[in-house]
């Protein structure tokens, strides 16, 4: 038996998988990573992605190419282009860069759980 996992699959991509059975095993949440003192930090309710435009003036730390693509797409749909000041595929480095005040970041909950 061979099993494959996919980070993300749009409906069009799944349609191309003829002859395969595709099942959702887990849906991953997108998490906003901010300095503890940031005005949006500590909000009890989940931050709606519509509020992402409130972060248009922030510097951003971007992740892997696919994650960076998601960030660019999400920001574009909210009317701004993120000012990416640093890029890394290392999740622990993203935390360090945010903690150092380099920028804010979006990470998947699964990626966060791999280092926390």
Image (tube, rainbow, N blue to C red):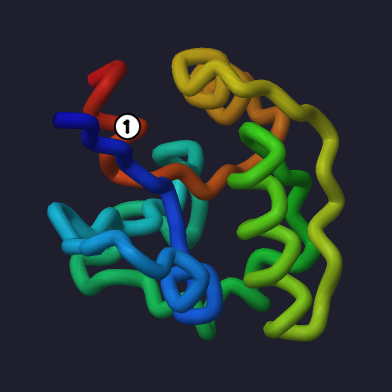
Q: Is residue 40 left or right of residue 66?
A: left
Q: Is residue 68 left or right of residue 95?
A: right
Tell me what residue is drawn at x 49 percent, y 59 percent: 39
Q: Is residue 62 left or right of residue 94?
A: right
Please name whichever residue, 105 or 21, is drawn nearer the observer in this view of the structure: 21
- Determine whether 104 is above or below 101 in the image: below
Residue 61 in sight here: no
- Determine whether 38 is above or below 75 in the image: above
Tell me what residue is drawn at x 45 percent, y 43 percent: 107
Please name whichever residue, 47 or 38, is drawn nearer the observer in this view of the structure: 47
Quadrant occupied by the C terminus:
top left
Please name whichever residue, 24 or 36, is drawn nearer the observer in this view of the structure: 24
x then y, percent, for residue 40: 45, 61
Residue 39 in sight here: yes
x then y, percent, for residue 14: 43, 71
Tell me what residue is drawn at x 39 percent, y 57 percent: 30
- Determine whether 89 is above or below 58 in the image: above
Quarter of the view holding residue 105: top right
Quarter of the view holding residue 111: top left
x then y, percent, for residue 9: 45, 63
Circle 1 Cα neighbour tier, 10 Å, few/some/many (<14 / 14–19 / ≥20): some
Tell me what residue is drawn at x 75 percent, y 28 percent: 87
Total number of numbered discs in the rendering: 1
Quadrant occupied by the N terminus:
top left
x then y, percent, for residue 67: 60, 46
Identify the residue under disc 1.
Answer: 112
- Determine whether 26 is above or below 13 in the image: above
């Amino acid at each position: 038996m061979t099993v494959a996992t996919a980070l993300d699959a749009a409906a069009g991509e799944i349609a191309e998988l003829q002859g395969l059975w595709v099942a959702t095993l887990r849906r991953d949440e997108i998490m906003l990573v901010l300095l503890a003192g940031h005005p949006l930090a500590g909000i009890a309710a989940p931050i709606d992605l519509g509020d992402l435009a409130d972060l248009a003036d922030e510097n951003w730390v971007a992740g892997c190419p696919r994650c960076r693509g998601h960030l660019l797409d999400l920001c574009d749909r909210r009317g701004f282009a993120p000012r990416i000041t640093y890029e890394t595929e290392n999740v622990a480095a993203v935390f360090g860069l945010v903690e150092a005040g380099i920028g804010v970041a979006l990470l998947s909950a699964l990626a966060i759980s791999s280092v926390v």
